[in-house]
Image (cartoon, helix red, strand yellow):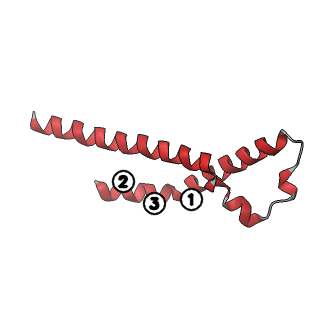
Amino acid sequence: MIQTKLDSIIKSFPLIFIILTTIGYVNLESYYYFFDIEIINYLEISEILLLFFNKSILIILLLISIIFIIYLVDEKITQEINDNK
């Protein structure tokens, strides 16, 4: 059971990376849009791929991870309660 969940997380990692990179780019673009600067002209590909390392993006990722862990723990507790009955 744990192996299948781990496999699904590993298979969805590229999608997670694309989503985080997109969120990082939108965050950066919205910041520089305020100053009327087209930041895409000044970025390199390597910088775009690492945009999700922004502190706010990492905080959002941490919160999503905590929610996911709570969901897994809740499912495990519910399953143990049902097994005991």
* Left-right relation of 66 to 44: left
Q: Which residue is found at the position 88% from the left and 49% from the top?
A: 38
Q: Quadrant of residue 66?
A: top left
47 with respect to 82 (left or right): right
Q: Which of pointers 1 and 2 lies earlier in the amino acid sequence?
A: 2
Question: Which residue is more in the foreground, 13 or 37?
Answer: 37
The 10 Å Cα crowd at callout 1, few under 14, some 14 to 19, many 20 or more, is: few
Position of residue 64 measured from the top left corner of the image (x, y, whole percent): 48, 43
| 12 relative to 59, above or below | below
Q: Amino acid at mark 1?
A: Pro
What amino acid type should be assigned to the residue bearing mark 2? Lys
Q: Residue at x 64, y 52 (%)?
A: 54
Secondary structure under the numbered disc 3 in the rendered image? helix
Residue position for label 3: 10
Q: Amino acid at mark 3?
A: Ile
**Foreground residue among 68 and 27:** 27
Residue at 29% across, 42% down: 73
Q: Which residue position holds label 1?
A: 14
Cα separation between marks 3 and 1:
8 Å
Query: Where does label 2 land, which residue?
Result: 5
Q: Reading the chain from its start, which is encountered first: label 3 or label 2?
A: 2
Q: CA distance from mark 1 to mark 2?
A: 16 Å
Horizontal and vertical percent for residue 69?
Answer: 37, 45
